[in-house]
Image (cartoon, coloured by chain):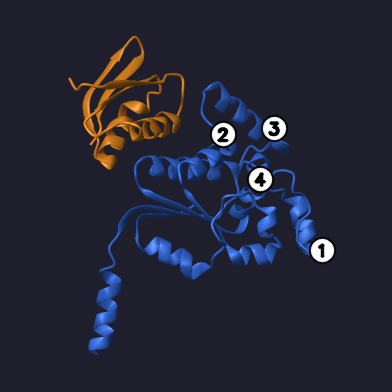
Chain colours: A orange, B blue
Amino acid sequence: MADTVTTLDVRNQSCPLPIVRAAQKIKELETGDVLEILATDRGALSDVPSWCDTTGNQLLEKGEEDGVFRFLVRKG
Amino acid sequence: MPDLVDVVTTSAAKEKKNKLTIIAWSGDLDKIWPTLILSTTAAASAMESCVFFTFWGLFTLVKPGVRITGDHWMQKMLSVMNPGNTDKAKLSKLNFAGAGPMMMKKLAATNKAPNPTELLELAQEMGVRLIPCQMTMDLLGLTTDDLIDGLEEPVGAATALLEMNDSSIQLFI
């Protein structure tokens, strides 16, 4: 686990907001910091990994609990 | 001969940037909507993102409240029959005199999906380059004062092609 984990809550928000907010949030972080994203948009399941692919950020974890999708992304 | 080879090589080898260019030709709500989603998401994905607004698509950029535009009676008539701004965009099907778009926006609000007006603001916030087509502006009698703030200088087809030429993704919507 990295030193800093920042949480972004985009539950109940639809495409493209989860990705746009994640992009805005990760800008504030330092390289190596971890961003936790909580989302309910089912599209985020594929969109967050795709976004990591395009941007060079690293997807550490992807899971679901009680209908909430949780992602851990390390800023690349 | 060597000159020609040089030219061909240069243009073929033009390196593609991680960049999206969309030619927004349609002003239909159901086309301008995905145009704005894709361009905003591209900007959020660290891609350069630009949208060239031409023909009916240009009406998307008309300021809210601007009604009759142009000097020629035909331009004026056109602007009355085709009011601009994202709020006035019609659906390509099931428009039902505006009931369709209203329902679509209601559904979007229920789903917490941003509507085109919100997306246009978001696009500008994310640094999407919005470029109006000069020729369409002249043809339809629109001036920069009729259009929303924060746009790039109006340009022509050659500049649109230049933007497309170095883009890894080009779309005409």
> In this figure, which residue is indicated by the disc labeled 1?
B73
Between the C-alphas of marks 3 and 4, the distance is 17 Å
Is residue B127 toward the left or the right of residue A33 in the image?
right
Residue A23, image x and y in percent? 37, 35
- Quick one: SS at disc 3? helix
Quick check: do tags 1 and 2 share a chain?
yes
Mark 4 or mark 3, which is nearer the start of the sequence? 4
- The disc label shown at residue B115, or none: 2
Mark closer to the chain start, 4 or 2? 4
Evaluate if marks 1 and 4 touch, with contact meaning CB atoms under 8 Å apart: no
Residue hosting label 3: B99
> Of callouts 2 and 3, which one flags the residue occurring earlier in the amino acid sequence?
3
What residue sits right under mark 4 in the picture? B85
B29 sits left or right of B77 in the view? left
Question: Looking at the picture, which amino acid does disc 3 mark?
Answer: Ala
Badge 1, how many Cα within 10 Å: few under 14, some, many 20+?
Answer: few
Is B31 drawn above or below residue A52 in the view shown?
below
Q: x, y percentage for residue B142?
A: 69, 60
* Secondary structure beneath label 2: loop
Chain letter for the residue marked with disc 4 in the picture: B
For discs 3 and 1, the disc positioned in front in the rendered view:
1
- Is there CB contact under 8 Å for labels 2 and 3? no
Task: Give the secondary structure at mark 4.
Answer: loop
The answer to whether A64 is drawn above or below residue B141 in the figure is above
Q: Image point 70% across, 43% down: which residue?
A: B64
Q: Chain of mark 1?
A: B
Label 1 vs 2, first from the N-terminus: 1
The three-letter code of the residue at mark 2 reads: Asn
Label 3 vs 1, first from the N-terminus: 1
